[in-house]
Amino acid sequence: MEGMEMTTMVFKWRRAFSREGIATTNFYFSQLYESLYYVKRIVQPYYIVVISNYNAINEFSLATRTFDMSSAIWLVIFNNKEYSFDYCHNPPGNIFHLKFNSEMLIRCGTENILREWYSVDTRRVEINDVATWSLEKGITKIVPDSLYERRHNLQDFSDKSSLRIAYFSIFFFITVISAAYSAALISFLTSIIHILPFHSLESFVEDGTYQFAVFRGTAYYDKFANSVDPLAKKVMKLMLKEEKLPSTILEAFNIPTPSKVSHLLIEYISPSTWFKNIKYNAKFRLHFWLQIGICKNRNLAIYTFDEIRRSVDLEIPCNVVRVEAGRVNRFAIVLSKHNPFTGVINFQLQKFVNNGMINRLRDTIFKKKFHDMIKYQPVPITTVISLIFFIQIGIILGRIWAMKDPDKRMPTMDSTMDSIHCSINCEHYIECPGNS
């Protein structure tokens, strides 16, 4: 008879939800884990749990042991008063495995009060009256705040002296670690920043305190000497005399003997493939190298490609800082007009771009090298011995205090869950309404 009443009640509820356009389904407690498939796949579901006897409490407690109770909103209805223990008003421990962010409302029998259940320390349940429920007025909130705004009863700072000493030691240790980490991070971020008087060819000309040089007998010299560009004419005023220009890269970077040095970030721009009929354009960004440090002339800038400098990267006896010049050289594959191979060449070049071959060649052949690496020195034990000594004192004092006063020891996490066994068999349903 009890099973028939339960089935009838569930049927009426589903019809009421259907009239409101809410899709519902029902299943047993043992099938609750199957709904985990829909977690984070749909909107947050609502579960209506009907508990009618001891066996239902035990089954639901077992089903929620492996279920994330904060993933849904719960309404649990206890509709039987014949309990030797008042599980509805005073549950033994956290029988439904709730968390602090769980949202569960409880109705006890025919009472018109809805109570909120949640857990702070996962060992006991916090119970608060939140609303009244009647057929005439519906659901009326007793408190105006939301569930999360009222959850301010987290455990305060412990009044036990042993725990206070341990907490203070931990807080002090964390503060020291945080300060050391912040100092190390700031030092790392600022130690390799070079402040330069200019950052482009235009600002280099405006500064006017540095000399300019290119390789003798190359097209770079003619580019500035024979150009009508006003900027090129200004650069020529800073250019070294032609007979003083370096003829080789060894002369440009003052490399008498091989020696290891460090340099800043090297940037290489991969070839860009622009295909129009017979042309293949490759862009190489020229760079403007400023010599600083122990080189012979600190006020000299060398105008060259990245690749030329990379060939003697480890032999430069000073630090070099790259300043982008902003000039681009273009190259093209020249073919005859209406050449039959134009299409296949363009196809293969575009294929290299699409499949990432161009990027791979750039990363393997012109791989960036970073030599401005900070070498950290080991920290001797003498610098941290005072901190370790302070933490040990806190632990020892806390231990001694706890041994002297056994009554103030921390409580053990004993489970207060009692197993419930009952031979009553009936159907237990969970209503799961959602948006249709």
Image (cartoon, rainbow, N blue to C red):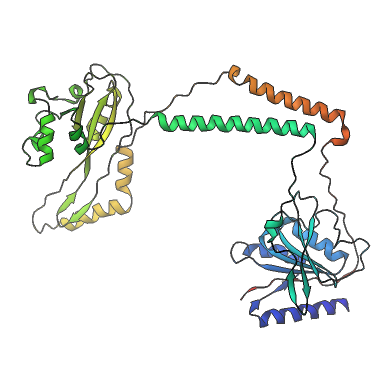
Q: Is residue 54 left or right of residue 319?
A: right
Q: Is residue 10 above or below residue 40?
A: below
Question: Is residue 321 in sight in this rendering?
Answer: yes
Quarter containing the C terminus: bottom right
Question: Residue at the location (15% across, 57% down)?
Answer: 277
Q: Viewer-proximal residue, 17 or 59? A: 17
Q: Viewer-proximal residue, 428 or 130? A: 130
The answer to which quarter of the image holds residue 165 is: top right
Q: Is residue 144 left or right of residue 209?
A: right
Question: Is residue 68 in sight in this rendering?
Answer: no
Q: Is residue 300 above or below residue 51?
A: above
The answer to which quarter of the image holds residue 361 is: top left
Question: Residue at the location (67% across, 65% down)?
Answer: 35
Q: Position of residue 327 (x, y in %)?
A: 19, 42
**Number of marks present in the image shown:** 0
Q: Viewer-proximal residue, 414 or 313? A: 414
Quarter containing the N terminus: bottom right
Q: Position of residue 34 (x, y in %)?
A: 68, 64
Residue lying furthest right in this view?
84
Q: Position of residue 422 (x, y in %)?
A: 90, 64
Question: Residue at the location (66% across, 80% down)?
Answer: 20
Q: Position of residue 56 (x, y in %)?
A: 83, 66
Q: Is residue 303 above or below residue 66?
A: above
Q: Is residue 201 above or below residue 46?
A: above
